[in-house]
Image: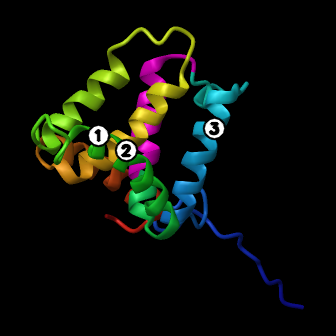
Amino acid sequence: MQHVLLAAPGITGGQIFGTVLTSGVALAAGVGLILGLRGSDWGPLVINNKKKAAWWGIFTGTAWMAAGGTWTDIAQGIGSVPTSLLSGDNGFGNPGLGAVAIVLTMLAFGPKWGSKTAPPAVIGLAAAVVYASAGGIWGILVNVINMLIGIVTGTGR
């Protein structure tokens, strides 16, 4: 009688969580952001200050942009609000997307939001979209996050 060893799939291709695609990262980031803002007992999902909220928003927005499809539509919908308010033909001139990125960063991290973490999270979501379009140092941040997503998904972005 022969013994056949059945091996469970291991960590292949760096996929420590199994198969996680870019849309899976977008889904997990969005759920994590919502759970963290609503309150969670799990350490990484505790979003209790403006810095964590803004960074979670930036990461989630970047993940949504990377995932494409409906995820990108949602992110661009959120990101289009400050862009339309702060640039183009609004009577104040066009400051450029780099300036919009600076203003969004100031709004996410600057004010005393108190115990409110949703505003900096939403501003972070919008900022991620603007960062991707603004280029410069903002594009570097987006590329770093995209590389991290590539490592998790095994796509090596």
Q: Main secondary structure of the magenta part?
A: helix
Q: Earlier in the sequence, mark 3 or mark 1?
A: 3
Residue holding disc 3: 34
Residue at the location (27% across, 22% down)?
Answer: 106
**Label 3 secondary element:** helix
Residue at the location (11% across, 42% down)?
Answer: 94
Residue holding disc 1: 85
Q: CA distance from mark 2 to mark 1?
A: 6 Å
Residue 12 position in % (x across, y down): 52, 68
Residue with the most extreme bottom position: 1
- 154 lies left or right of 4: left
Residue 6 position in % (x across, y down): 76, 77
- 98 lies left or right of 147: left
Residue holding disc 2: 81
**Label 2 secondary element:** helix
**Label 1 secondary element:** helix
Is residue 56 inside the magenta stretch?
Answer: yes
Residue at the location (57% across, 24% down)?
Answer: 47
**Which amino acid, mark 3?**
Ile
Residue nearer the viewer, 14 or 70: 70
